[in-house]
Amino acid sequence: MRQHTSHMVGKVYGCLTVEAFTGKRVVARCACGSAREYDGRDMRRGRIISCGCKPQALTARHPKAFRAWWGAIQRCHNPNYKAYATYGLAGVRVADEWKDSFGAFFAAVGDTPTDKHSLDRFPDPFGNYEPGNVRWATAEQQARNQRRNHEIWKSGLSAKQVRRMRMRKAELKYRAKKKAEKMRL
């Protein structure tokens, strides 16, 4: 189902400011002064950032960073997205300055160091996608930073110790409970 673009009036996408909604398209004025109709979906996705006076190169040169940015927005703000229940309903949000601008996100986070890196919320895995809480991480780093690892943190063991000892979740919960009882005494 196609999303209405009427809510875009007044918003800025790159160099384009949306002035009107014309049914299926929007009229936007570029910073250079020219105005014309555009597909609102392409503007929201960062595919169109100017009338052509500026190259569309930022998203084209950094597709992995763009997909990570777009994925974070979808997870947090699109109720129709498959992972919305885990992120959006849990209250995770993308910073306002990043939500409408891939350029602002890219300026703060930069490009992926390698193809093996992906976007990670760190140091607070429960926090938002915002400056100071986002990094490019490897799969191993992300596995250690998952919310479900809270039993490891409570048990007083490091993730490395748990992997080495091949502990089951029940053992971790038992250790965390014993540690909590000791602290109460």
Image (cartoon, grey):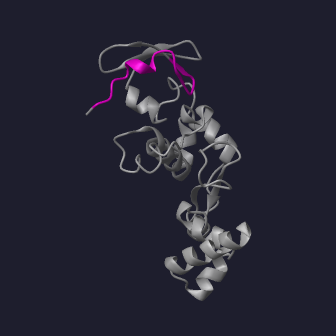
Q: On the rendered structure, is 135 left or right of 43?
A: right
Please name whichever residue, 185 or 68, is drawn nearer the observer in this view of the structure.
Answer: 185
Magenta stretch encompasses residue 11: yes
Up-down: is 6 above or below 112? Answer: above
Q: Which residues are magenta?
A: 2-17
Query: Percent x, y for residue 83?
Result: 40, 50
Using the image as rendered, state which of residue 118 and residue 55 is in the foreground: 118
Image location of residue 49, percent across then percent down = 52, 29
Query: Residue 145 in the image: x percent, y percent?
Result: 60, 63
**Residue nearest the observer in this picture, 107 or 170:** 170
In the rendered image, residue 111 lying in the magenta stretch gets the answer no
Residue sitting nearer the eye, 114 or 32:
114
What is the residue that sits farthest to the front in this orientation? 185
Residue at x 62%, y 40% (from the top left corner): 105
Residue for point 64% across, 73% down: 155
- At 66% from the left and 71% from the top, the residue drawn is 181
Instruction: Please give left or right for residue 25 compared with residue 183 in the image.
Output: left
Q: Quadrant of residue 159?
A: bottom right
Q: Position of residue 61 (x, y in %)?
A: 56, 47
Residue 100 vs 140, above or below: the answer is above
Quadrant position of residue 115? bottom right
Return the residue found at the far left: 1
